[in-house]
Amino acid sequence: MTTSRSGADFDRKNQDRYSTGNLSHRFDSGGQWIDLGERAAVKSVAAASWGRPILDIGIGAGRTTSLLTMLTDDYVGIDYSQGLIERAQQAFPDLDIRFGDARDLSAFSDKKFGLVVFSYNGIDSVGHENRALILSQICGVLAPDGHFVYSTLNKRGPFFNKQPWSSDRANSPRSLPDRSARFVVRVMLDNREYRRRLSEWWRMRNTVEDHGDWGMGPLGGPGSGLLMHWSTPAATSRELAEAGLQAVAFFDTSGKRLADGEDATSWCFHIVTERAA
């Protein structure tokens, strides 16, 4: 297995960041899909998951709870951020919502869940080696005919190793000098926001690792402060196979189902999986 120099230290920092600052609002209990791809992925397994036990991993403050409890009354939600899970418990006091880490699902019965969901690129907040552990743990609690749905940041998308002066669009036609000049203008117009973005990029610029079809690098956007894992459909299929799982479908953020071997161009993509034959 290819190893990464990033590990437990950034895992811990990410865990702290999820429940603080300007990130926590992204995981509130609003019951909104993050994009059309997430909705399409869950919709594709909704009929097969109807009325069955569901494990919702990385729920934050309960963003996906009201969406998934439309499918079942047998719902468990977990998150490894104590602050966020307390907010979810307050929002849904009658549901089984508890502190938990995807790297240890021993509290749950083997092969119990008809559906496991790990949304909003939550699996990307741990190191490369821990992804294999998470996938094996999920395989252990997934029913023989169950499905696992999750999302991961796209290394081929527009935001991996993004510099502050880069365009937010993939394949931007603008030249580097033009993009740099526009960035300087934005700094002048919104000094605090872009200084923060530049400062954060400078602080985390040496954390980027490129391993071909996967990598490690900071999550873009001012004030995020997260170091994340980035992947491709090919790398995802390989790590799923190693855990005893197989991809059934890939969706980009527009809800388009990707053809076999097709790379996503969106910032993340969603995967529907099942146990390998």
Image (cartoon, rainbow, N blue to C red):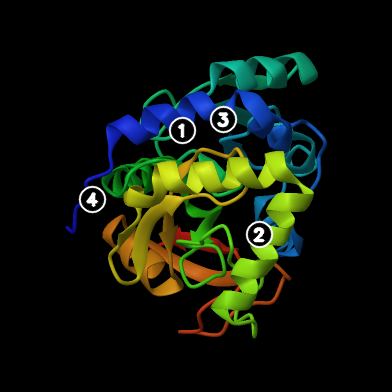
Q: Callout 2: 10 Å neighbours few (<14), some, many (20+)?
A: some
**Closer to the camera, 183 or 37?**
183
- Check whether the beta carbons of the residues at disc 1 and disc 4 lie within 8 A of each other: no
Q: Residue at x 71, y 38 (%)?
A: 26
- Give the mark, 1 or 2, whose residue is nearer the N terminus: 1
**Closer to the camera, 149 or 221?**
221
Q: Which residue is mark 1?
A: 14
What separation in Å lies between label 3 and label 2 (alpha carbons)? 30 Å
Q: Where residue 78 sits in the image (x, y, percent)?
A: 56, 27
What separation in Å lies between label 1 and label 2 (alpha carbons)? 30 Å
Q: Which residue is mark 3?
A: 18
- Relative to 111, is 211 above or below? below
Check the picture and name the quadrant holding the N terminus: bottom left
Image position of 209 (left or right of 99) = left
- Check whether the beta carbons of the residues at disc 3 and disc 2 lie within 8 A of each other: no
- Relative to 146, is 98 above or below? above
Res. 157 image quadrant? bottom right
Image position of 236 (left or right of 188) = left
- Give the mark, 4 or 3, whose residue is nearer the N terminus: 4
Image position of 94 (left or right of 267) = right
Q: Residue at x 32, y 58 (%)?
A: 244
User: Label 3 amino acid?
Assistant: Tyr
Q: Which residue is mark 2?
A: 184
Q: Where residue 7 sits in the image (x, y, percent)?
A: 28, 39
- Tag in front: 4 or 2: 2
